Image: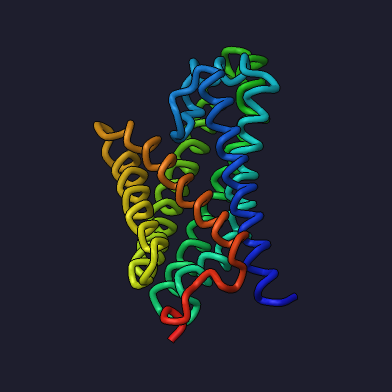
Amino acid sequence: MSTWSIVRLAGVFSLLSAATLITVIALGITAGGEGPAPVDFGDPEVLRRLAASGSTGYLIEVLALVAPALGLGAGIGWLHVAGKDRGEAQMGVLLWYIGTLFIVLQDALEVAAFQTLPAAYLAADAASVPAILANGDLAGNIIAILTVVGTIIGDLGILLIAAALMARKDKVSLFAWVGFAAVAGRVLGLLVPALAPLRMLGFLMLLVWVIGLGLLMLRKGDGAAPAASRT
């Protein structure tokens, strides 16, 4: 497969990932969600709410897993956009891949927990409830840890890719600031409880990043990076 077609295919995966994430956000808002956040599977009220969400809740969880999985196909294109011979771009894409694999694992565990714990809680007798909630706490803690690790590693990669984009001498370099804003919102919203609303803003900025660079890859193919960025 030629390099040109790989870059363009990366643009397709980028846009598919963005479309899936937009669907997740729209369905979550429609279902009364409060935006992206780790699920507390050890909370009885949360388990009852998840059980009541039925097929819609399950669809949200599955699509939340599909979105980053599709996004894995976009990273090679980001490398070409930022300059495939630039060290910061290479390291950035590597870190982003590692972080995204943590996120995919986190989402897979969340789908598994959604499939089992709410129904088990509703069907449990009084003696079984503490064990189910303990398993829910364990699952929730593992998911939260994977979320933090994946977000920090992946967003560090985005910072490095954004730094490489700043070296471009065209309008695409403006995407560097979109990347910086996305990372700031996602990380601060995740680590600082008082700034939790910023996490949704960070996700929206990440969508701008993914969609914009995806369109660029589709339009320019291997011409995504100017000659100056390849030297």
Q: Is residue 7 visible?
A: yes
Q: Locate residue 148 relative to residue 50 in the image: left or right.
A: left
Task: Identify which residue, 169 or 166, lies in the foreground.
Answer: 169
Q: Residue at x 64, y 47 (%)?
A: 16
| Quadrant of image for the N terminus | bottom right
Q: Position of residue 164 (x, y in %)?
A: 37, 70
Q: Tell me the residue at 44%/57% (across/down).
A: 154
| Residue found at the very far bottom of the displayed protein | 231
Residue 210, image x, y percentages: 51, 51
Which colour style is shown? rainbow
Q: Is residue 112 visible?
A: no
Counting labels gives 0
Task: Report which quarter residue 121 is drawn in.
Answer: top right
In the picture shown, does residue 194 fall above or below 147? above
Q: Between residues 150 and 162, which one lies in front from this camera angle?
A: 162
Q: Is residue 128 above or below residue 146?
A: above
Q: Which residue is at the front of the view, 28 or 58?
A: 28
Q: Can you say which quadrant of the picture contains the C terminus?
A: bottom left
- Up the image or down, 75 lies above or below 226; here it is above
Question: Residue 208, how many percent across, how many down?
Answer: 46, 46
Which residue is painted at 51% across and 22% down in the image? 29
**Residue 99 as seen in the image, left or right of residue 1:** left
The location of residue 174, given as percent across then percent down, is 36, 58
Residue at the (56%, 55%) spot, across then down? 214
